[in-house]
Image (cartoon, helix red, strand yellow):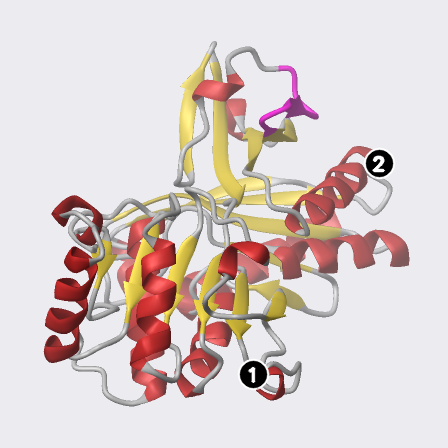
Amino acid sequence: MKKIFLALIKAFEEGKDSVLVTIIASSGSTPRGAGARMLVLPEKSVGTIGGGAVEFAALQTARRLLSLRESRFHSYDLSSDDVENLGMVCGGRVTVCLQFISSADSHMRKLTEKALKLLSGNEDAWTITDITGGTVNGMGIYTASGLWGLDIKGAERLVSGRAYPVELGGRTLYCEPLIRAGHVYIFGAGHISRELVPTLARVDFRCIVYDDMKDFLTRELFPDAEKLICGDFGDISSHIAVTEKDYIVIVTREHKYDYTVQAQALRTPARYIGIIGSRKKIAFVTEKLKNDGFTEEDISRITSPIGLKIGAETPAEIAVSIAAQLIAIRADYPSQQ
């Protein structure tokens, strides 16, 4: 999302019109679900709605709408003739909103500026688009302080963790998470962390890497990290304040540091605590935690071995398994913790 808003603000600055392409509904085996976005400019596009023939068709339509200066909705029924026409083998239905944005649209420019500011913070936020009557009637941003840009009563009832269209007060609204508050605190700056940070960053997790060795914490090694912290593993609370929306990943260079961080993590309200380790290590650490006064309920908060069970062995594969697990937990997908 940030790349799209950055491209959009640049389009405003350069006086270029654009078309924002959004999947607002999908069913069946479609390439991407609701919330996938692509910004189409005269000379290029930014983002993706899943690739393939659907994206190509949407891209061609968007370019026509640029010249017509119009918005439009289009549905692709991938379980009928469109399967053959589009060259797709997956079934399902995709509804796409193609929103023309004039370079002179002051409201959308202010919304883009607001979105970029929010994307640099740590506050839950959603975009809400009025699509009543099959056209784009306006877009706003909702945060805890209220709804900006649209006049809708009861907007607080609309927000959730997923993108979806909804009916409210005789209006059809498309709601999509813009920012999910919370960070992934990664303890240990070794090989797994170096693979994990870019993997998580690509799916909009904001990562903070913590290690006690300054030489491991460089922008060359972690260009995608939001922050790098050099501190004592035994005193993490002096450097960070973990909330119930944060995730903790423990992959330090030694078992003793893993345990030190783990014991402190259990005293926080973190949404997720994952620690790498073998079954032997897990059994040893569990017994040690009990001896140190932690209850079975406390220990049950820990995910170990970390990540989904996909047979991962290399640092890159382990990073994929951890990222997949965090995606599932963020989406409240069952049985992933």
Q: Where does label 2 land, which residue?
A: 106
Q: x%, y% of residue 113? A: 78, 44
What number of labels is visible?
Answer: 2
Cβ–Cβ under 8 Å for marks 2 and 1: no
| Lateral position of residue 153 relative to residue 307, left or right | right
Q: Residues within 10 Å of mark 1 (few under 14, many from 20)?
A: few
Measured along the vertical axis of the image, is residue 250 above or below residue 205? Answer: below
Q: Position of residue 221 (x, y in %)?
A: 59, 86
In front here: 244 or 238?
238
In the image, residue 12 lies in the stretch drawn in magenta: no
Residue flagged by tag 1: what amino acid is it?
Met
Identify the residue at image location x=68%, y=52%.
120
Give the residue drawn at x 11%, y 79%: 280
Query: Mark 2 belongs to which amino acid?
Result: Ser
- At 18% from the left and 65% from the top, the residue drawn is 288
Question: Which quadrant of the figure has residue 50?
Answer: bottom left
**Magenta-highlighted residues:** 143-151
Q: Which residue is mark 1?
A: 213
Q: Is residue 328 visible?
A: yes
As rendered, which of 189 and 327 lies closer to the eye?
A: 189
* Above or below for 297 versus 167: below
Q: Considering the image in quadrants, where does the N terminus appear?
A: bottom right
* Residue 41: quarter of image: bottom right
Q: Can the viewer see residue 87 in this picture?
A: no
Q: Nearer the viewer, mark 2 or mark 1?
A: 1
Name the secondary structure under disc 1. loop
Residue 32, picture quadrant: bottom left
**Would you place residue 194 above or below residue 121 in this image?**
below
Q: Quadrant of the C terminus?
A: bottom left
The answer to whether residue 12 is left or right of residue 19 is right
* Disc nearer the start of the sequence (2/1): 2
